[in-house]
């Protein structure tokens, strides 16, 4: 399987200029490909093939108007062209129903003011990691990389990224083999929430860190300072970077926290069952800020990725399953309960904590669905 390793890099001032040139050239090639295809659509002509766009790129580099495209690695330009082709394939696959997931819009032009700028080098570019641990890139030089961990194999490509906070990253794609963890007997159901991030069916709870809420005061002041700066001024650029760094700090803390807890759950359980929450729908309600701050989607995605890597099972339970209203002891489905109701009593005599009861029901429903998938006939209480 392929894995991506993101490592912080520190290019020198001259290398930053060379990278900015590469970002700009890749952006121009990408936009030219979008423009060519849009022009063909307006004129009623067939869409140009990938090979035709590649030949056009080679020809345009020889013209005086675009001779500066030769100042960067040709692989960077070809990869930008490949990105445009992929964007159109995904768009056509989305509108025809061949591509799963939410509908995608038509590819849009890239801007020099985009929060994220990136260029990709493949093996054809002959990039290499030097004996001193630096990343040697064609027409850029040896870039310093902070090796927080070693790569498990030779990288097939590296993407140099500059984010909104002005930080640089080297993102390596490597091929590695899966190493399943030792089998364990434990299985767990997880009920995700806002006040408490997660309640596990075995009684464990994970408190919600609320990184955004904790940083709200600092973020508000940074945004206020940005709004007072004149547009186009150097002070506004500095203020914008301060805002981006504050947001990046929150996002990094949330991602690190999610990685640690998802890894712990994967190591301790052979099968994990979670509710298939409609995060997009909840993000349009009055709870939007809290939902985004919780990062449910990122957490469940990490669980799925690590389960595939380490030989575990993650299964999502239907979002319409009444996990909070079903008694985990007798199976009786009670009436609707507002979020303010945290405990409730079943006529069978059981008194339930709302979240713990939901986690137990998710565990039972996940087990039943898993057994049904294997061809067994089971009930929810099995």
Image: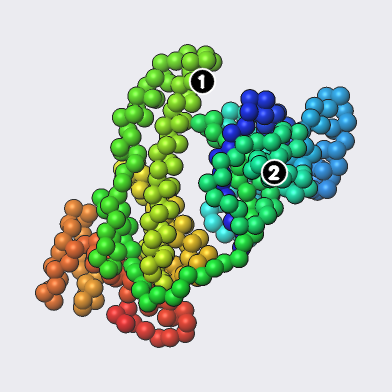
- The foreground one among 191 and 205 is 205
User: Residue 9 in the image: x percent, y percent?
Assistant: 58, 37
Crowd around label 1: few <14 · some 14–19 · many ≥20 (10 Å): some
Q: How is the image coloured?
A: rainbow
Q: Is mark 2 on a helix, strand or loop?
A: loop
What residue is at 81 percent from the left and 42 percent from the top? 53
Tag 2 and tag 1, C-beta contact below 8 Å: no
Which corner quadrant holds the C terminus? bottom left
Q: From the viewer's perspective, is 57 left or right of 215?
A: right
- The foreground one among 300 and 96 is 300
- The foreground one among 84 and 337 is 84
Seen in the picture, residue 178 relative to 112 is either above or below; the reply is below
Residue 189 tag number: none
- The foreground one among 51 and 100 is 51
Seen in the picture, residue 304 relative to 224 is either above or below; the reply is below
Q: Mark 1 points at which residue?
A: 237
Quarter residue 130 falls in: top right
What residue is at 50 percent from the left and 67 percent from the top? 310
User: Residue 295 in the image: x percent, y percent?
Assistant: 39, 49
Q: Is mark 1 on a helix, strand or loop?
A: helix
Q: Mark 2 points at which residue?
A: 130
What residue is at 17 percent from the left and 67 percent from the top? 352
Can I make out residue 47 in this image? no
Q: How far apart are marks 2 and 1 (CA)?
A: 35 Å
User: Residue 234 in the image: x percent, y percent?
Assistant: 52, 15
């Amino acid at each position: 399987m392929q894995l991506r390793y993101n490592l912080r890099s520190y290019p020198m001032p001259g290398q930053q200029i060379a990278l900015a040139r590469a970002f700009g050239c890749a952006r121009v090639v990408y936009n030219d490909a979008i423009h060519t295809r849009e022009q063909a659509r307006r004129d009623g002509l067939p869409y140009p093939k990938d090979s035709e766009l590649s030949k056009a790129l080679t020809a345009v580099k020889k013209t005086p108007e675009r001779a500066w495209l030769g100042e960067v690695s040709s692989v960077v330009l070809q990869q930008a062209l490949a990105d445009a082709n992929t964007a159109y394939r995904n768009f056509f696959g989305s509108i025809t129903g061949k591509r799963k997931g939410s509908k995608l819009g038509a590819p849009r032009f890239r801007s020099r003011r985009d929060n994220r700028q990136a260029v990709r080098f493949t093996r054809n570019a002959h990039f290499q990691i030097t004996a001193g641990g630096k990343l040697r890139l064609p027409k850029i030089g040896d870039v310093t990389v902070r090796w927080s961990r070693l790569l498990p194999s030779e990288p097939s490509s590296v993407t140099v990224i500059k984010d909104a906070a002005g930080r640089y990253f080297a993102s390596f794609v490597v091929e590695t083999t899966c190493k399943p963890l030792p089998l364990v007997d434990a299985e767990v159901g997880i009920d995700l929430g806002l006040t408490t991030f997660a309640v596990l069916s075995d009684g464990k709870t994970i408190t919600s860190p609320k990184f955004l809420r904790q940083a709200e005061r600092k973020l508000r002041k940074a945004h206020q300072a940005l709004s007072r700066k004149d547009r186009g001024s150097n002070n506004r650029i500095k203020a914008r970077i301060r805002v981006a760094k504050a947001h990046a700090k929150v996002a990094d803390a949330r991602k690190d926290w999610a990685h640690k807890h998802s890894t712990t759950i994967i190591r301790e359980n052979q099968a994990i069952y979670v509710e298939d929450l409609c995060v997009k729908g909840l993000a349009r309600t009055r709870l939007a800020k809290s939902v985004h701050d919780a990062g449910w989607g990122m957490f469940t995605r990490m669980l799925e990725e690590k389960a595939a890597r380490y030989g575990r099972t993650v299964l999502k339970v239907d979002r319409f399953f009444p996990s909070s209203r079903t008694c985990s002891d007798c199976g009786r489905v009670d009436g609707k309960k507002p979020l303010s109701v945290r405990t409730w009593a079943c006529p069978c005599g059981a008194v339930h904590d709302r979240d713990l009861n939901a986690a137990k029901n998710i565990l039972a429903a996940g087990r039943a669905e898993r057994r049904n998938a294997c061809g067994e006939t089971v009930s929810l209480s099995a």
